[in-house]
Structures are given as structure tokens and as C-alpha cells.
Image (spheres, grey):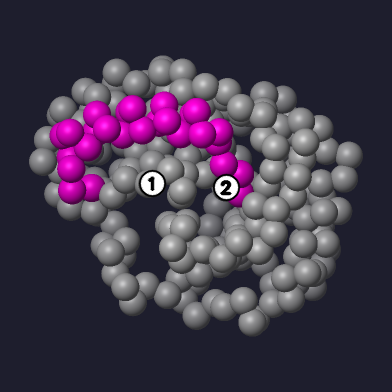
Amino acid sequence: MDLAEHYNRLYASSSETILSGNYSLDSKINDPSDSRFGITLLLRPSEKIKTNIWLFLDELKAIEANQYYYPNSDIHITVMSIISCYEGFSLDKINVEDYIKIIEKSLEDLGEIKIEFRGVTASNSAIMIQGFPSGETLNTLRNKLRENFRNSALEQSIDSRYSIATAHSTVMRFTEKLQNPEKLIEVVEQFRDYNFGEFTVDKLELVFNDWYQRAKNTIHLTEFNLS
């Protein structure tokens, strides 16, 4: 996949949708009865990059203060959604150690993962930071995970919603009617090619999580050191 082209197409269609008022609101993000949970293998950008992201988010908050902004603790890139969130899933349904073993097997002989956060894009309900992995290591890992989990008898739902191929990070979600969509897009345009920084991934995290990866609802299962 040509990531730059993918992000550009996504932004072109989504910005038009936002400006026309046909965007979507996330109705469940503040719903305490939302019981969708799953398990995810993820990575997190460096603290320096998170600081740069918040320079951008502060600009958005000045325009749209009532939307949902991801705190530093929740900013992440999904490596693989192993069990996509669904209502009623709980950890007692699986043996976590079995999942850890398959991930460890998938990490064998893996090269360095380096990601550049450059520019922003949008969906019809969110704003995202564009991630660009250098090399094929992240794709290689994802393909190993797909193969190894499919060859197991473990519960998994890899690629059931869509086949993950990007390295973006969602940082804002629309939860209320936008007060000034034109100004929002104007700010996003200013950061379309902004260099938030590059980082080398030193660890991956396996977590039990809600739909939004909120730290308060996350159980840290284990981490895998890559350095």
C-alpha cells in the first residue's frame, strides 16, 4: 500500500464530508454502559512526539473544546487487533499465556521498527496523525501474526473489521456537533505535512482494552522489548 496516497485520498473525501456537515458523531465514547472489550498488540510514540502532537491538539481545542481528545496515556498505534472489541468479552475467556507465546514466536528474527509521524489526515468522525514506517518490518510482523494466529485454535478476529495496513494514530474524535468545521479544517490544513518526529520502537504492549484504548479501562498484560 502507498501510505501517502491512502492518507491523501482519505483526507480529501473526509474533509469534504466534514465541511458539508455529513460527518459522524461517536455516541458511545461517554456511555458508561459501553461494554466492548478486546485484546490488542500496540506501540506508543516517544514522549517528545506526544508533546508535538499536543501542540497540534491545543490548536484544535481552541476551536472545538467539546470534542474528545486522546490524553498522552492513550495515544498509540495498533500493531494488531487480536480480538476486536465486542460486548461481553472478558479475560477469563482466554489463556493469556497462549497469546503471549504466539506473539513471541512472531517476533523472532524481527528487524528494527522505525516510524515517522508526518502530517495529519481525517475520517468522517476523527482526526489522525499519519504514521510512515521505514522499511517492511511492521508489515512483516503483522503477516507473521496473521499466519501464526490463524494456525492456532485460539479465539481471534484478526482482519475481521478491516485488514490493518496503516500506522496512524487517532488523536481526536467528534462527540458533539462541530462549532466551526471550516476553522477546524483550516488548522488541520496547516498541519497536513507537519513533522511530528521519528522514533524507533523499543517495546510492544499487549493489553486488554476498551474501544478507545482509555488507560483507565486498560489492563496491561505484558510487554515485549525490542531493543
Sequence-wise first label, 1 or 2:
1
Across and down, in percent, residue 190 comes to 29, 18
Q: Is residue 10 visible?
A: no
Which residue carries the number 1 mark?
71
Q: Write the residue at 42% across / 30% down.
A: 51
Residue segment shown in magenta: 42-67
**Does residue 191 show up?**
yes
Residue 59 on the magenta segment: yes
Query: Residue drawn at (60%, 40%), measured in percent from left and top?
Result: 165
Q: Secondary structure at mark 1?
A: loop
Q: Quick check: 9 above or below 91?
A: above
Q: Nearer the viewer, mark 1 or mark 2?
A: 1
Q: Which residue position holds label 2? A: 78
Q: Amino acid at mark 1?
A: Pro
Quadrant in the rendering for residue 139: top right
Quadrant in which the C terminus is drawn: top right
User: Image check: 22 left or right of 113?
Assistant: left
Coordinates of residue 90 in the picture (x, y in percent): 57, 78
Which residue appears at 12% of the width and 35% of the height? 180
